[in-house]
Amino acid sequence: MHAPRDPARSPPTRREPTTNDRPPTLPLFPELEPEPPAREALGPGAWVLRGLAREHGPALLAAVAEVAAAAPFRRMRTPGGRLMHAELTACGPLGWVTDARGYRYVERDPETGRPWPPLPGLVRDLARAAAAEAGFPGFEPDACLVNRYAPGAGMSLHQDKDERDLAWPIVSFSLGLPATFLWGGAARAERPRPVPLAHGDVVVWGGPDRLRFHGVRPPADAAHPLAGRFRLNLTLRRAR
Ligand code: SIN
Ligand code: FE2
């Protein structure tokens, strides 16, 4: 279905010149040329796509505000009864929830009894583009979890494994305050690698990395010009 690139073999945006290569066309005004979005491999199936969504920041934040107006942010409890630190809401056909009955995807917001707000077209399009960029073409998300972190709120190491078909990747957008993403291993005990994420960065993980443990360190207290004192995260999944 997809062939994740081998990061060791081919950094996607640059390659070594060969003798047959023609010299590159130099830009007339190099300072005006946009930098290609930098990609960093976190694993054979996992990429940080730096700044991929940055230019859409205002539109994405407006879309989040619209979602939250219909399905307000709330703190959910883990099946074990612990209150999560991040506030959550969702959009799209399915929303991820957690309560005493467990983790699952549901078609209706348990707070309002209404279907979750629709998945904004921009979010779908960007998620598809990011997934394709990371080697997962044809991604059609049916669930978008929206996490809101105030300074001091983080998320402990966990795996995303409530989805039916683990062949599809996770696509995760970071907006607002910067924070450190924790990129763990296949086992919880493995020490995670800290990955700083800024407004507009996108992380995609799938294939051999699909079940990697991950989490988020609480953002430091600051004000982001577009998002105020929050970090927002949109996580797109194919749940069913
Ligand atoms: C999550 O794993 O659900 C959230 C990840 C993030 O906030 O970056
Ligand atoms: Fe997650």
Image (tube, grey):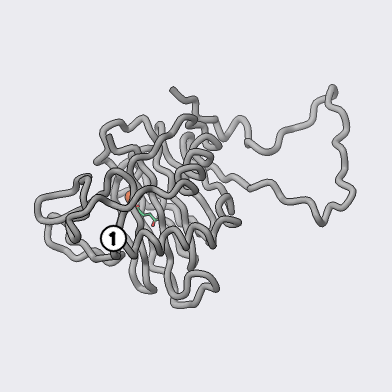
Q: Is residue 41 visible?
A: yes
Left or right: where does residue 171 sit relative to residue 100?
A: right
- At x 40%, y 64%, the residue is 65
Q: Quadrant of ligand 1?
A: bottom left
Q: Quadrant of residue 19?
A: top right
Of 45 and 223, the residue lying toward us: 223
> In this image, 45 relative to 95: left or right?
right
Q: How many marks?
A: 1
Picture residue at 41% right of the left edge, 32% below the top: 207
Q: Which residue is mark 1?
A: 71
Position of 68 relative to 45 (above/below)? below
Report the residue at 41% width, 60% height from top: 64
Q: Residue at x 39, y 45 (%)?
A: 236
Identify the element where label 1 is drawn.
Answer: loop
Residue 98: percent from the left, percent from the top?
A: 19, 54
Q: Quadrant of the C terminus?
A: top left
Q: Nearer the viewer, residue 28 or 66?
A: 66
Can see residue 209? no
Residue furthest to the left in view is: 101
Is residue 150 depicted above or below 199 in this figure?
below
Relative depth, front residue between 178 and 74: 74
Q: Position of residue 23 (x, y in %)?
A: 88, 33
Figure quadrant of the N terminus? top left
Other-residue count near label 1 (Cα within 10 Å), few / some / many at <14 / 14–19 / ≥20: many
Image coords of residue 147 (percent x, y): 35, 59
* Label 1 near ligand 1 (CB < 8 Å): no
State which quadrant residue 163 falls in: top left
Q: Amino acid at mark 1?
A: Ala
